[in-house]
Amino acid sequence: MAEAAIGCGRAGEACEPLEQLAGALLYDEAIHTQLILLLGHAWRRADGLRQHELIRRRLTDDLGVDPGAGLRGAHLALLGDGERRWPRASP
């Protein structure tokens, strides 16, 4: 879902439905990874970073596991590190 929205230039429109899905699937790393990347492409980096922190804490505190590679990669992308990069200036 997120990749299609990003590819069509509609990342902002897809955020709310994916945020609702992530709220219902609290431990689903794939959904949260997609949401974090989508938020980055929708110029909502701060929200993406908050989302990463929420899922990271939930995974470590509730399940005793560290975030997987996908979540770590999405986090690094938001920080401007890794494969994906977004411009720093607002559109």
Image (tube, rainbow, N blue to C red):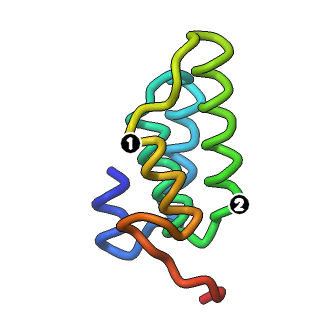
Above or below residue 17? Residue 24 is above
Residue 47 position, x and y percent, is: 68, 55
Q: At numbered mark 1, what does the secondary structure look like: helix, strand or loop? A: helix
41 or 79, which lies in front? 79
Q: Are marks 1 and 2 in contact (CB under 8 Å)?
A: no
Q: At numbered mark 2, what does the secondary structure look like: helix, strand or loop? A: helix
Residue in the image at 57% along x and 37% along y: 20
Q: Say few, some or many: other residues with alpha carbon within 10 Å of mark 1 (under 14 / 14 to 19 / 20 or more).
A: some
39 or 83, which lies in front? 83
- 45 vs 85, left or right, is right
Which badge, 1 or 2, comes first in the chain's sequence?
2
Q: Nearer the viewer, mark 1 or mark 2?
A: 1
Above or below residue 52? Residue 40 is below
Q: Say few, some or many: other residues with alpha carbon within 10 Å of mark 2 (under 14 / 14 to 19 / 20 or more).
A: some
Residue 63 position, x and y percent, is: 56, 10
- 35 vs 2, left or right, is right
Q: Which residue, given by chain and number where applicable, does mark 2 sit on?
A: 46
Total marks shown come to: 2
Q: Which residue, given by chain and number where applicable, does mark 1 sit on?
A: 70
The kind of residue on which mark 1 rests is Gly
State how far apart marks 1 and 2 are (Cα): 18 Å
From this viewpoint, which residue is outermost toward the top?
A: 63
Residue in the image at 32% along x and 50% along y: 1
Residue 22 position, x and y percent, is: 53, 34
Residue in the image at 60% along x and 89% along y: 91
Identify the disc placed on residue 51: none
Residue in the image at 47% along x and 58% along y: 38
Residue 12 position, x and y percent, is: 53, 66
State the image quarter where residue 89 is shown: bottom right
Above or below residue 70? Residue 24 is above
The kind of residue on which mark 2 rests is Ala
30 or 66, which lies in front? 66
